[in-house]
Image (cartoon, helix red, strand yellow):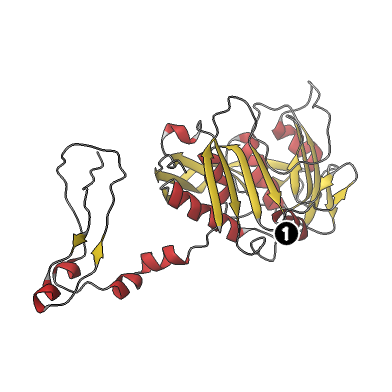
Amino acid sequence: MKASLVVVAVALSAGPAARGQELPRFEVVDRTGLSGRFDGDLLFMPEIARGGFSLDRIARDPLVAAQAAAPRFEVASITVNRATTGEPDLRVQPGGRFAWTSTTLRNLIGTSFQRFAFDQREIEGGPAWIDTARFDVLVQTGSGAPPTDPEGFPGTLFAMIQTLLRERFSLATHEEVRERPIYRLVTVRADSRLGPELKAVAGGCGEALKALSNGERATERTGRGPDCAFGGPPGQLQGNAVTMDMLARVIGGQVRRPVVNATGIEGSFDVDLTFSPEFVPPPPGSRVGDLPPSPSDAPSIFTALQEQLGLRLESARGEVSVLVVDRAEMPRPE
């Protein structure tokens, strides 16, 4: 049980006080809602007891400095969504305003801890409510849309969301590397010739991701939607101007196992894959052009990859980074 001491106007009285020096005084307010008496063990900096307390010294602590330097939203509001219906939604508006509706903490964690585009993070641990409690989140950056890297990846935005989760949900996580069964995405043909539904295209994700991060509409191609996007109903996967790395990550969501790109093929591609889905995964990305449902006699995704894209999945074992949730608490009412 987490114990808390109710302390008001605490005075530090070691060392310098004996020499007539005035010490900092702190007001600590109990907001735990706990009552009763508790046994506890308190760990603190020995420098305080020896009279070496220094705000400047604390400010130089690497952990404190890192927390102070973490990017933050200028305005942030989190409220519990108690509606019994409604799909999760994210709206990006010009000027650095982002609004999530009916989202879960797991979804926010998965979004903000992405290491690259379409990263399918494996998340373990945490209380059961991170999958069930729904939240409406509205945030505003201080100076327009946060910057993206040269490839358009919104790393600064994701770092801001991480800071928000740590401060408002008391989120604590750590990374673990574990050996797991994986798939390697390789070409069927030795000459790396691709299938008819995998077509090389000019351009890439950079401009499209920057536009989306700015709340702007990315350029759309007739019948396909915006570049740097995946979508489609169950049994249909359409990708627009995506890389092999991105395709491998999204296929991993379909087969429920990490997929590593081992094709050695560079460039951007349009993808059109029709298969018989074994389960319905969450939407992997932005909307794309409307597609008809896959036919009932469609092949398995393993066969479809070979016949339509000229690719295949090869079983292997490899190291997988797992994000472990150590602590998460419901946010306090605003």
In the image, residue 151 sits, relative to residue 307, either above or below, namely: below
Q: Residue at x 66, y 43 (%)?
A: 90
Judge whether residue 121 can be spotted in this image: no
| Residue at the image point whose x is 54% and y is 34% from the top | 134
Residue 152 visible, this orientation: yes
| Residue 290 figure quarter | top right
Residue with the most extreme top position: 296
Of residue 259 and residue 149, the one placed in the foreground of this image is 149
Identify the residue under disc 1: 210
Q: Position of residue 223 (x, y in %)?
A: 89, 41
Q: Nearer the viewer, residue 43 or 153?
A: 43
Secondary structure of the residue carrying numbered label 1: helix
Kindly indicate the quadrant of the structure image that contains residue 272. Answer: top right
In this image, 27 relative to 307: left or right? left
In the image: residue 165, left or right of residue 42:
right
- Say what amino acid the circle numbered 1 marks: Lys
In percent of width and height, residue 269 lies at 80, 51
Number of numbered discs = 1
Structural crowding at the residue carrying mark 1, measured as other residues with C-alpha within 10 Å and reported as few (<14), some (14–19) or many (≥20):
many
Residue 265, given in percent of the width and then of the height, sits at 74, 56
Farthest left residue in view: 18
Q: Quadrant of the N terminus?
A: top left
Asked whether 168 or 269 is in front, the reply is 168
Above or below — where is 72 with respect to 249?
Answer: below
Place of residue 301 in the rendered image (x, y in percent of width and height, measured from the top left): 71, 33
